[in-house]
Image (tube, helix red, strand yellow):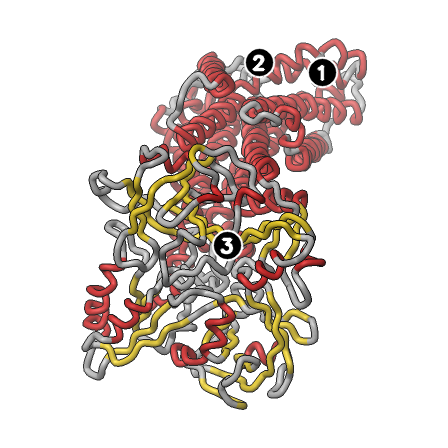
Amino acid sequence: MGALITLVVAATVVSALWFVVDSTVRQEVPVERYAGVPLVVGTGGIAGAIPPELVATVDALPEVAATVPDLSFAANLSVRGVPVEVAGDQYPRPWGHGWSSARLTPFHIREGRPPRAENEVVVDARLAEAARIRIGDRVEVGVSGTVRRHEVVGVATTPTAWRHQSALFFEDGHAAKLTGRGSGTDALGVYPRPGTGVESLQAAVARVVQSHNAPGARTVRIASGADRSAEEGNIVPGGGFNTLWFLVWTTALVATGMVAAAMGLSVRRRGTEIAVLRAVGARPGQIRRLLLTEGMLFSVVATAVAVPLGMLLAPVIAARFRDFGTVNAAFEVSYHPLPMLWTFALTMAVAVLASLMAVRRALRIRPGDALGEAPAEGGRLGRGRLLTGLALLAMAAVLSLLQLRDLVDFGGPLGNLAVQFAGMILIVASVGLVAPWFVLLVGRLLRGGAARTSRAGGFLAVANVVFNHRRFAGAVGSLTLGVTLVGVIVSTQLFYDWRAAEQSARDVSADHVLKPPAVTGGLSEALRRRVQDHEDTSAAVGIRSLPLTVTAEGRPPVQGPLPPTTATVVTGDITRVLDLSVRGRPLGDLGKREVAISDSLAARDKTEVGSRLRVRFPGAAKDEVYMVATIYPDTPELTSALFSRAGFTAAHLSPEPYNAVYVRGADLGESAGPGSVVESLSKREYVWRKTQESAERNRVLPYLSVLIALFCLVAGVNSLCLALLDRRREFTGMRHIGMRRGQVMRMVCWESVLTVVPVLVLALAATAWTVLVHSASEPTGLANMLLFIPFDWLAPLGGGALLGTLAGSLLVVRAAIRNER
């Protein structure tokens, strides 16, 4: 039953994840925004990256009947000051477009008329219903940090389903003015001439688009059919497919170990039975078939129970993944037979593999053991496990020492990250292997104190833990692995979150940072100027990030895809708001055809101050040559390359809308003026926001470690309870020599405490070791070590493990001595 329970828990989680993975494969992401056009030229969401010359060239193709440019931008709608949200949308705010692009869906006017003036807007029917808007109502629309009042002149609807995004339509010139972008457009809908098929149209457009992509890059791309959904800027295909597969196989791997431990313990407790079978003539092959058949029966029963439970659990997991952004808002779990079959196959494989591990242990039992009344106890664990654990511990110590002393160059940031990850694996594995001996050592040290504290229960508990520590080894290893894994991974994540904030605190000299109201929004140049012109403001610097490709001039062309690079375009004197030590000229002195690059980019391309780089901006038809004027240290505030607004040569791209505006001087409340909806953060608040953003980007791995830890805790508690099941004779004997029922139960509770508490101490020590190695890499890290130890994560896990073992042990003992004679 213990092995079966462990297998059911494992199969339930595996089946739930497999239903989600299968649904990810099968899902058809709805095409909504571009449902009315057969072909879309897009850039995957790079604002304004399609230049006018590309639009004109595509429009002139003989296969093309018409082209429709599209602008998509975040437009925050409010009615009488209350923000409007539509349930089920990918983002909490609507998207704005020019009315001429309404035909791409297509939208048509249901009530009212199209917009013709700057202060007019058309809303889609879902949005109008959610906001209870009617023709003639006045609404507030916030774009790029500025709110403007508009009159609702029309309500638009579509002939197809419109479920996951909301739309506002403006007069075309007004839409372009609201975005503050250059002459480029975000996407281009292409309609074929009569008689031209989609494949012919796509081939013709592809020949034109090819020249606007750098060799090895695919910035401007063509989408038709279901691929159009990726260009809508809202609903995109789930990006977590690899993450989900990683979860499935990690869960299966951990389940194999946990089930093997449970079945191994079961076989050891059935030593007398197996010895009797061997004594009466059973051959090893018969014992092997017996245990393998049991494992197969386990898998059948476990799958029958786990698949329905997995179907109930899958929507809960999917909802969590939606919060993480691993799957999109349109994702829905579907139930097909294939995940059920794969769950059965995987459960069968886990059970058979665990049975094979147990068979090896069973065949070591000698037939002569049948002469005893119980299996031999008190055996020691093999030295191989201890030596392996110590060897891994030594390797982890060597890696830690090399990192602490910077004795070896591991190949830059990626190499250092790989070494840190390897060190974490070594620490977790080694601690899990040596944990039983640590529990043995603690038991020996506490023997005298436990005997004085509880003369019967405490003394016998310590004696059991010390003499029969092999009995507790499976549970100890599982508990240690789970708690240590969470401690190491979460502490590492906390350190990196803190480091991102620490770097920002060190590099940012601005008094305030203005951020857009939503992740899809931006800040306009008009807002930046309004802040800059305030009498109490000495500097207002706007930054925008955009992807591009960079290669060193004179170098051989790169084989394969070009490595991605992200650049920052700066408006204003960046030296007034960021404090960076640079090589070359100050960042504020960059001129035309000059670029500043980060240390990591300089190392990647082997460039120095004075070198020349070939830069291809998104949508551009040719490279631009820039001279490296400055090299600055890597910082979370800037990307790999930096351009000044004056030196930015991509005419179709605009340096705005800004991702942020750094301000020296007055707060936004005094300087931004009425109607602004931007978020103004003090430096301290901005640093805290950096920590939150880092944690948001890396949520999956900590929660994955918790999932594995829960597996381990279930398996550990299960192993401890299994170890008590065959001790009925022992408990009855204690009762016969005069021990009270309460003394027996206290003894079992002491055993649980003496097993679990050392495990928690060992896991905490491993976590502290990891934290020490990480903290030593930062100047002020050691002073903040306690901040990186995740007590709020470890305490519930440790408390749950202790309570689970206590409750399980008491239930087992109560059942064992209920009918003693």
Task: Report the quarter where the N terminus lies.
Answer: top right
Q: Vertical placement of 515 versus 362: above or below?
A: below
- Choose between 262 and 637: the one closer to the eye: 637
- Choose between 536 and 486: the one closer to the eye: 536
Residue sitting farthest toward the bottom? 112
The residue tagged 1 is 460
Say which label, 3 or 2, has the lower sequence index.
3
Position of 103 with respect to 267 (left or right) is left
Image spot of residue 623 (x, y percent): 27, 52
Whether residue 364 is visible: yes
Residue at horizontal 45 percent and vertical 55 percent from the top: 19
Check disc 3 and give the amino acid type: Gly
Whether residue 369 is visible: no
Say which label, 1 or 2, has the lower sequence index.
2
The residue tagged 3 is 325
CA gap, disc 1 and disc 2: 14 Å
CA gap, disc 3 and disc 1: 53 Å
CA gap, disc 3 and disc 2: 52 Å
Image spot of residue 361 (x, y percent): 44, 22
